[in-house]
Image (cartoon, coloured by chain):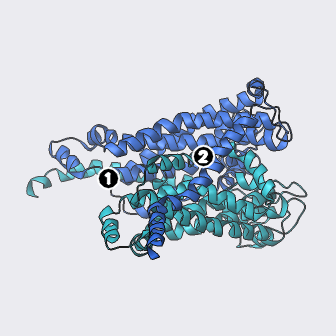
Chain colours: A cyan, B blue
């Protein structure tokens, strides 16, 4: 301690300068990241006169939620003036079953691939894994045909099928990578005791799985809620998910352009995933990194 | 009586793992690989509004590469992809290193940097389009501050629209790169760092010589993920520039959608999708191969 104290003053001075620079950079980036959120929320609370007459960055004069109400229940999307509400529920009805189904299938597949390594399991996993990275443009056209043949084009059921299938690659990856870290001895011991495939899954694997289940559910929910490509390709009119409806609302050109309503609609669309992110951010980050650093 | 029955049950139990994997695997085989073959086949036909199953060879690909819209889309993808990857990695890496300096409010700052990743590209596009509004957006605000030549109406400019896409995409993804790098920084062996600093190495040197080189795998992952994001980019273009002005900022994914659903050029759309797939495969297959192999050996 004593010898160090002689260095402290000089070091401290340069450190203070560096510290200030560091904070300046961090804060500048924080402003850049927050700017769109600030502008969107601010604009959604102003009336049109205030938007035209004032600055983009000015605070709203009062908390005026008219635009929010309008975006939720009155705004015109195409020719129908129902607001975003029905499309919000479309997205909810679409997301819940696809999230649950793809997570369940992913868990079972990941478990079978890691703890019951049969011949060819690695090839099966590699083939599934590539499904994470296929550009969806290559499946859109056959998918449109197939949905038409089954008779579920332009329905929420069609989108549930699509999201379950293409989410499967990711959920399998999550669970497989998680189960690889569970010692095989646990399973082997249970097998010797006479426990079967599903008993081991229920009694041993599932109780260890909550963290990865949370990761998978959050990841899938975010992906499915935020999807635009599938929604825009396979649905029109009343069956659209909220992202597609929101985009149509913003681009509906009848009458005066209501920027405040556009921004309120954007907020409503973003709210569920933002809520999940704020409540369970830790798991969200883990999903992001698990989806990328794999093996 | 009960013996053969047991045997059957036994045999079922033995292949149960395969039975459980089968549905997922079958779904992927059909909906991914089957559909790729289907699209590949369609790209060799003269399908217009509806699929037509008579093969005509590579003519759709010839047509595709004669279209100006497609060469613009490819060129845009190159510019967009390159700038997006480089800038997002530089910013992400910088932020990760800065946040690694024992910052007091690290959790809060990280939350701010990463929230764009939780929202849809459609929202990002809508928000930035509003900020870049030529008459009511940021341009007017900054000019009001006295910087008269400030120009931020990028979405309406043929030359700048692609850079508007880069800006918004970097905004969305650099927090993610930061999270990747930060978790890698935290897993660097602390003993090596301690040893180096005892030997008198400056923090700067430790970063350049020890920490950054050890992060090469993460760096690779980041490049691959971002490249993959760039090739798939579709919704951001729809919401931010609409591919315009004209088709100045269109990307391959938007080209494919336009041909398939708006212009009744299904074969050309399928051909463009196959080119996209080939591009992704050229990046992903070697990467996945090395990742899976590396795991086995290491």
**Left or right: A40 in relation to B116:** right
Up-down relation of residue A258 to residue B150 (above or below):
below
Examine the image and state in which quarter residue B201 appears: top left
Q: Measuring 81% from the left and 70% from the top, which residue is drawn there?
A: A70
Up-down relation of residue A6 to residue A71 (above or below):
above
> Mark 2 — residue?
B169
> Mark 1 — residue?
B187
Give the CA distance from mark 2 to mark 1: 28 Å
Chain of the residue under label 2: B
Q: Position of residue A103 (x, y in %)?
A: 55, 65
Mark 1 residue crowding within 10 angstroms, few (<14) / some (14–19) / many (20+): few
Examine the image and state in which quarter residue B231 appears: top right
- The number of discs equals 2
Q: Position of residue A158 (x, y in %)?
A: 74, 60
Mark 1 element type: loop
Upstream in sequence: badge 2 or badge 1: 2
- Whether residue B161 is visible to the viewer of this picture, yes or no, is no
Chain of the residue under label 1: B
């Amino acid at each position: 301690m004593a010898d160090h104290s002689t260095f402290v003053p000089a070091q401290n001075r340069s450190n203070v300068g560096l510290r200030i620079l560091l904070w300046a950079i961090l804060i500048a980036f924080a402003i850049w990241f927050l700017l769109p959120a600030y502008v969107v929320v601010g604009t959604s609370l102003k009336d049109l006169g205030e938007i035209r007459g004032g600055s983009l960055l000015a605070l709203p004069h009062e908390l005026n939620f008219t635009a929010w109400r309008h975006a939720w229940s009155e705004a015109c999307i195409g020719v129908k003036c129902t607001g975003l509400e029905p499309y919000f529920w479309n997205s909810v009805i679409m997301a819940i079953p696809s999230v649950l189904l793809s997570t369940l299938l992913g868990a079972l597949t990941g478990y079978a691939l890691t703890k019951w390594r049969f011949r060819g399991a690695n090839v099966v996993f590699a083939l599934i894994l590539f499904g994470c990275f296929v550009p969806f443009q290559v499946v859109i056209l056959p998918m449109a045909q197939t949905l038409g043949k089954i008779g579920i084009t332009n329905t929420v059921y069609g989108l549930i099928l699509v999201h379950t299938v293409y989410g499967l690659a990711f959920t399998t990856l999550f669970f497989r990578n998680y189960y690889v870290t569970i010692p095989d001895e646990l399973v082997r011991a249970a097998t010797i005791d006479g426990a079967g495939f599903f008993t081991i899954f229920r009694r041993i694997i599932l109780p260890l799985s909550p963290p990865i289940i949370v990761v998978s559910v959050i990841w899938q929910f975010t992906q499915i809620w935020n999807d635009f490509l599938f929604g825009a390709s396979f649905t029109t009119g009343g069956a659209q998910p909220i992202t597609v409806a929101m985009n149509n609302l913003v681009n509906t050109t009848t009458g005066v352009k209501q920027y405040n309503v556009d921004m309120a609609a954007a907020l409503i669309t973003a709210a569920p995933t933002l809520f999940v992110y704020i409540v369970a951010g830790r798991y969200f980050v883990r999903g992001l990194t698990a989806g990328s650093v794999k093996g | 009586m009960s013996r053969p029955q047991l045997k059957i049950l036994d045999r079922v139990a033995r292949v149960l793992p395969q039975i459980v994997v089968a549905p997922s695997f079958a779904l992927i085989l059909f909906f991914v690989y089957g559909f790729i073959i289907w699209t590949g086949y369609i790209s060799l036909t003269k399908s217009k509004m509806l699929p037509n199953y008579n093969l005509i060879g590579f003519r759709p690909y010839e047509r595709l590469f004669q279209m100006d819209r497609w060469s613009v889309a490819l060129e845009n993808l190159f510019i967009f992809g390159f700038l997006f990857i480089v800038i997002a990695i530089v910013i992400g890496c910088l932020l990760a290193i800065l946040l690694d300096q024992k910052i007091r409010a690290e959790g809060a700052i990280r939350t701010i940097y990463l929230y764009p990743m939780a929202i849809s590209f459609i929202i990002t596009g809508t928000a930035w389009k509003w900020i870049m509004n030529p008459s009511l957006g940021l341009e007017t605000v900054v000019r009001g501050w006295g910087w008269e030549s400030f120009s931020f109406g990028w979405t309406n400019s043929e030359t700048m629209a692609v850079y508007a896409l880069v800006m918004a995409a970097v905004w969305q993804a650099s927090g993610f790169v930061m999270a990747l790098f930060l978790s890698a920084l935290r897993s660097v062996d602390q003993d090596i760092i301690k040893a180096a600093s005892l030997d008198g190495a400056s923090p700067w040197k430790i970063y350049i010589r020890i920490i950054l080189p050890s992060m090469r795998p993460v760096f690779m992952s980041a490049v691959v993920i971002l490249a993959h994001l760039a090739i798939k980019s579709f919704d951001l273009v729809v919401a931010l520039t609409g591919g315009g002005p004209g088709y100045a900022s269109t990307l391959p994914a938007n080209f494919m959608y336009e041909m398939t659903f708006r212009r009744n050029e299904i074969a050309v759309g399928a051909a463009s999708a196959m080119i996209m797939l080939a591009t992704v495969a050229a990046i992903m297959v070697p990467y996945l191969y090395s990742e899976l192999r590396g795991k086995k050996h290491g």
